[in-house]
Amino acid sequence: MSDIVLDIAGLSVAYGQVSVVNELTLQVRRGRIATIVGSNGAGKTTVMKTVVGLLAPVAGTIRFEGSDIAGLPSDDIVRAGLALVPEGRRLFRSMTVLDNLRTGAYLRDDKAAVAQSLELVFSYFPILAERRQQIAGNLSGGQQQMLAVGRALMSKPRLLLLDEPSIGLAPVVVDQIADIVTTVSRSGTDVLMVEQNAALALELAQDAYVLENGRLVMQGPAAELAQSDAVRQAYLGM
Ligand code: ATP
């Protein structure tokens, strides 16, 4: 089996006439965390939405485990094994933690398997088990991000897409996010993460892509990019 889990080639996406992602080529490899870094408006969220079928590409292919999923309906893409944790988390804030988690399994009808996934999520994030009957909107920011990740894991994905997991969170909570991403990856779910917080992203990921104005301007091992002058000046404030 190929070690390339997600293989994006020549991907272009536009909003009407406005081209936002141009000929992007990117790969996520099995067992490794990949990240797309770039400033506000670079097109990162657009890439994520396109991969999970919320936007249709103008051109290009998106292969997941060998099959082209570009342009498929979102439900089919979730069934194929991808899940998105959206920017801003998008929880059902007035519902309980447990009900939020259950919504993540909406396409699965094997109750025993869903119960197993729930136990797995609770084992990753014990605080969610403790607070399962609480209203999601009352959780702290970090706990809400755990819940958003947990909900995505309830579809039992093999590839998790994380859009700006650290946004709006205090530095101490950002450390928790780092732990979450590492936990998920080590448990065998591959990860593609987009981040404005390049320091965090380059620390966590093994493979990195830098997007500017919808174009890939740099790519390589995250540790190498973190040392490059261009990245340090533009994204790490050094
Ligand atoms: P952010 O960190 O702000 O989410 P990003 O890198 O994820 O930034 P995108 O959200 O993908 O960037 O946006 C890329 C470009 O597309 C921006 O110029 C943005 O203004 C534009 N854009 C995003 N959504 C829409 C939309 N629904 N209609 C038109 N233009 C959009």
Image (spheres, rainbow, N blue to C red):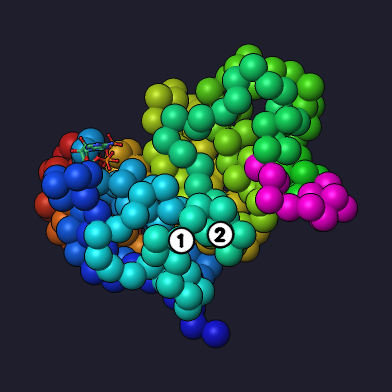
Give the camera-side residue of 40 and 232.
Answer: 40
Image coordinates for residue 48, horizontal then vertical, percent: 38, 50
What label sits on residue 76 in the rendered view? Answer: 2
- Quadrant where the C terminus is found in the figure: top left
Residue 32 appears in the figure: yes
Nearer to me, 20 or 164: 20
Left or right: residue 89 versus residue 120 is left
Picture coordinates of residue 214, whole percent (x, y): 18, 51
In the picture of the structure, the residue carrying the numbered disc 1 is 72
**Residue sitting at 55 percent across and 32 percent down?**
145
Residue 3 on image: x %, y %? 48, 78
Q: Quadrant of ligand 1?
A: top left
Residue 103: say if magenta.
no
- Does 236 sit above or below residue 186? above
Q: Which residues are magenta?
A: 104-115
Q: Answer few, some or many: residues within 10 Å of disc 1's Cα (few below 14, many 20 plus, some between 14 and 19).
A: some
